[in-house]
Image (tube, helix red, strand yellow):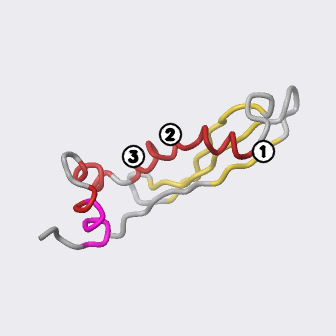
Amino acid sequence: MTIRHQRGHLRCTKRKNGPSAWEFLWRENDASGKRLRRTAVIGTVEQYPTEDLALAAVNGLRVSINEVCNPQRRRTSIGATNQSRRLHDRGLKPP
């Protein structure tokens, strides 16, 4: 099985009331294997005036999403070195 890393998508959406908000979108599989689209509001454009600031705020969320979406990687990365993690991602075994 290929390990998928989510980069996600950041967009600015207009709100009916109040300032526009930054939303982060990604996909994940449910228990039956069906792909679902997920959305999380990061903050308003007043909190993060530029896209770069909003992207910086998303980094922690992106890491946690990748851990949840890739439980096999999470199990193998406990106590593993960076080299063995990279080898595992390529489907290889460490020497």
Give me the residue at 39% from left, 46% from top: 68
The residue labelled by disc 1 is 12
Does residue 9 appear to the left or right of 35 in the view shown? right
- Circle 3 packing at 10 Å, graded few (<14), some (14-19), many (20+), is few
Mark 1 and mark 3 residues within 8 Å of each other at the beta carbon: no
Q: Which residue is depicted at the point 23% across and 50% down?
A: 75
The N terminus - image quarter: bottom left
Amino acid type, residue under disc 1 in the picture: Cys
Chief secondary structure of the magenta span?
A: helix
Q: What percent of the width, then of the height, locates residue 57? A: 61, 37
The residue at which mark 2 appears reads as 60
User: Residue 93's mark?
Assistant: none
Near mark 1 (Cα within 10 A), the count class, few <14, some 14-19 or many ≥20, is some
- Amino acid type at image mark 3: Val
Using the rendered view, name the quadrant where residue 56 is placed: top right
On screen, residue 84 versus residue 55, left or right, reads: left
Q: Quadrant of the C terminus?
A: bottom left
Report how far apart the C-alphas of labels 1 and 2 lie in the structure.
19 Å
Nearer the camera: disc 3 or disc 2: 2
Q: Position of residue 27 (x, y in %)?
A: 54, 55
Residue on which the image places disc 3 = 68
Q: Residue at x 87, y 27 (%)?
A: 17
The magenta region covers: 85-91
Q: Label 3 vs label 2: CA separation?
A: 13 Å
Say whether marks 1 and 2 touch (CB < 8 Å): no
State whether residue 79 is above or below residue 29: above
Q: Which badge, 3 or 2, is on the more N-terminal residue?
A: 2
Give SS at disc 1: strand
Could you say where residue 31 lies in the image, as x and y percent from the top left? 38, 52
